[in-house]
Amino acid sequence: MIDPERSRCSLPSRRQFIALGIGALAVVATPRLFRRRRELVRRAVPVMGTIADIAVVHRDERYAQTAIDAAIAELRHVDATMTRFSDSSEVGLANLKAGAEPVVVSRGTALVLEEALRWAEASDGAFDPCLGRAMALWDVGRRAEPPPADQVGELAGRRLYRSLELGELAGGPAVLIADPDAAIDLGGIAKGYGVDRAVEALRSYGIFNGLVNVGGDLYALGVSEDGDPWKVGIRDPDDPDGLVGTVEVSDRAVATSGDYIQYFQHAGRRYHHMLDPATGEPRRATMRSVTVMADDCVSADAAGTAIFGMPVAQASRLLEVRARGARVVHSV
């Protein structure tokens, strides 16, 4: 998985750099002097705990903004139904009822849960969508030291995803969490699904050249305003103003998982948000980030989460099983 090109790239000038999102990916553009006459219409909004940036190549700015409205509405809907941070969301309600009773959910939530379970089974539990209580315990965005070891141990090696049951209730999809220690956390897959839904919203408006980036989960439609494939820069884990590489993308998704966005330092160790279900604590890995390209963003998102820290051969087998055609385009 290690890219032979390990040299760090300097940050492009302001005229060459479009900062799309606060996550792990950015978009490099050619200077306006060399672009053909097509306009890039952009908007950035907070959603899904990060910044979503949407760019559309279109001559009619008003029409482009209407299409962007529809894309943002899709992102907000996914956030409202699948966040674990609200008891009123479908995921939040299912977590409240864990160990007690099933909860009716929307088709979209059921679809994402089904896909998450497929990744869990294929990865032998390396991807676990039911680590919500462990994620809340670590809360790396607010902690300054690890939680008590006995509390971590209670949630380690449990394969909690096996307590998640999908079925039907009153004619619609429903979810039951059988183990009260399990709680759904779709942080490793829902953003990718949201990006895919936003892309479909753009396409429904006849937009075939654009880009949706939600905190490092990105889909590039068609070509950029200069007529070439989108050039995506991968942020340097050690320098927020630097890049470690670039990749050209057209009608494909890219997602980066890394240990440098959400973390705290303690006793010389970096404790990040990428938890290892086997240990219940942040994964110990020699890599700092991994970037995956796939046909859709839900696959790229889940793949990046699942293979972070995996040996090369194991990661390759998993991608072959769950996301045929997906590949690691960079790791550092």
Image: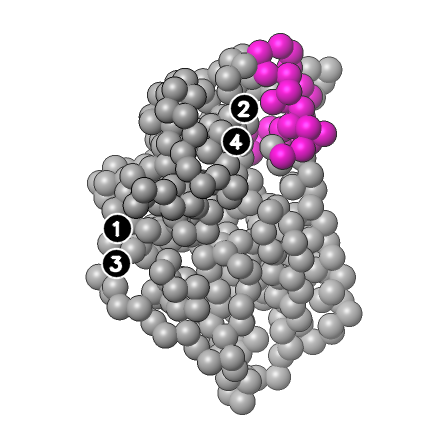
> Can you identify the residue that label 4 sits on?
136
Amino acid type at circle 3 is Asp
Question: Percent x, y for residue 211?
Answer: 57, 62
Q: Is residue 158 visible?
A: yes
User: Relative to residue 69, is residue 168 drawn left or right?
Assistant: left
Secondary structure at badge 4 equals helix
Could you say which disc has been placed on residue 1 in the image?
1
Tag 2 near tag 1, CB within 8 Å = no
| Residues at marks 3 and 2 touching, judged by CB atoms closer than 8 Å | no
Question: Contact, CB < 8 Å: mark 4 with mark 3?
Answer: no
Q: Are marks 2 and 4 in contact (CB under 8 Å)?
A: yes
The earlier-in-sequence mark between 3 and 2 is 3
In the rendered view, would you say 203 is above or below 181? below
Give the amino acid at mark 2: Ala
Pinpoint residue 195: horizontal percent, then vertical percent. Answer: 58, 50
Q: How many marks?
A: 4
Q: Earlier in the sequence, mark 2 or mark 4?
A: 4
| Residue ID for mark 3 | 3
Which callout, 1 or 4, points at the residue further toward the start of the chain?
A: 1
Tell me, yes or no, if residue 116 can be seen here.
no
From the image, which quarter does the C terminus lie in? bottom left
Please state which of the two labelled residues, at mark 4 or mark 3, is closer to the viewer.
4
Percent across and percent down for residue 235 are 41, 62
Q: Which residue is mark 2?
A: 183
Mark 3 vs mark 1, CA separation in Å: 6 Å
Q: Secondary structure at mark 3?
A: loop
| Residue at 69% from the left image edge and 76% from the top image edge | 59
In the depicted structure, whether residue 195 falls above or below residue 164: below
- Whole-Å distance between the Cαs marked 2 and 1? 31 Å
Magenta segment boundaries in residue numbering: 85-114
Say whether marks 3 and 1 touch (CB < 8 Å): yes
